[in-house]
Image (cartoon, coloured by chain):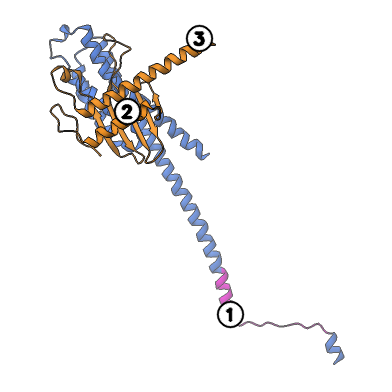
Amino acid sequence: MAVDRLRPSTARVTITFDQFLGIAGLLVGFVGVAYAVKLDQKLKTSREAEKQIEKKFMHYIAAQEFEELAIKAAGIMGKIRRREWALVPGLADDIGPSLGQVRGARNRLLQSLERDRLDVAATNVQAFIDSLPLAGSEAELTEDQMQTMLSRCRPLVDVASEIAGRLRVESIQQSEDKK
Amino acid sequence: MSTRPNHFFGESDDPREVELIHSLVEKTRQGKIPWVKQASALTAAISSGFGFEINFVLAPTLSFVNPHSSSWQLLTVRDRSGSELVRVSNPPMITVLAGAAKSPLVHAADELFKLVYGAAGDELDRAINTIKKL
């Protein structure tokens, strides 16, 4: 009796094989859940990165489109200054639809003042197209008439190049902000 | 929002639009609307209440007419969400010369523009005087 008191008491826990399997299953389940959470986080991060790249690419393409528009308008202005009338009507006919297309496609990226300025530029481009001389009567154009034509193209060059610059900077900033 | 263009023989203006522009004239006179002059626009943002954004887009200047004179081509008033409340296009000079009467809305916008553009000139005078006093 006295010897039994001195012996440290050890509680024996015996588990059955089924219980062991249950605990093992629980542990595997925990590990599985943790792994799934980790994968989900990775997926979210990759989706965010994908969206960021898409956004950056969209800004880049839009910047390029506005830049092309500005170059086209500036090209027309150059041709008027040099009195190279042969190509002007074709370029003028092309710029109206191009402006409408870019404006429509990139409307979401534009600020309200930019939209207004593009509207005004479109009105001026239309007035410019309407004021083009008929074939053969270009020589009769006065200096003032040519100045008016140039002034009607200038708003488009200004606003399109400004938008292109802003969008380009924003696409760079987005990637730098992420860093 | 007004989607009605100001045609040559246009429909009548919504009196509330005219009233809105007149209110802007009044508040600008009181110096309660801060206007900002940009290269090709005059803009103002009102942050109180609904919050408004007002844009005057300037017409291209012709060097042979008067390089220092300016006129507007488009006026828009938008609320904070970007919805357009007022859109007024200034009819080209040729239509005015042809005898077409300006609508009350265009008249109101004209008044606002003259006031804002004049104020920008006053600020320039103030800047000149300030520098002279240095």
Q: Which amino acid does the dot numbered 2 rest on?
A: Val
Q: Nearer the viewer, mark 2 or mark 3?
A: 2
**Quadrant of residue A76 in the image?**
top left
Chain A image colour: blue
In the rendered structure, does residue A16 fall within the stretch colored magenta? yes
Question: The magenta stretch spans which residues?
Answer: A7-27
Q: Secondary structure at mark 1?
A: helix
The residue nearer to you, when weighing A88 against B72, is B72
Kindly identify which residue carries mark 1. A19
**Quadrant of residue A69 in the image?**
top left
Give the mark, 2 or 3, whose residue is nearer the N terminus. 2
Counting the numbered discs, the total is 3
* A46 on left or right of B15: right
Residue at (42, 41) in percent of width and height: A53
* A8 on left or right of A146: right
Residue at (23, 29) in percent of width and height: B105
Q: Nearer the viewer, mark 1 or mark 2?
A: 2
Residue at (25, 32) in percent of width and height: B18
Q: Are marks 1 and 2 on the same chain?
A: no
Q: Secondary structure at mark 2?
A: helix
Q: Position of residue A32 (x, y in %)?
A: 52, 64
User: What chain is tagged by disc 3?
Assistant: B
Q: Can you tell which mark lies on residue B25?
A: 2
Residue furthest bottom as drawn: A1
Chain B image colour: orange
Cα separation between marks 1 and 2: 84 Å
Q: Eyeballing the image, is A152 above or below A14?
A: above
Q: Position of residue A148 (x, y in %)?
A: 23, 14
Q: Can you tell which mark lies on residue B132?
A: 3
Q: Which amino acid does the dot numbered 3 rest on?
A: Lys
User: What chain is tagged by disc 1?
Assistant: A
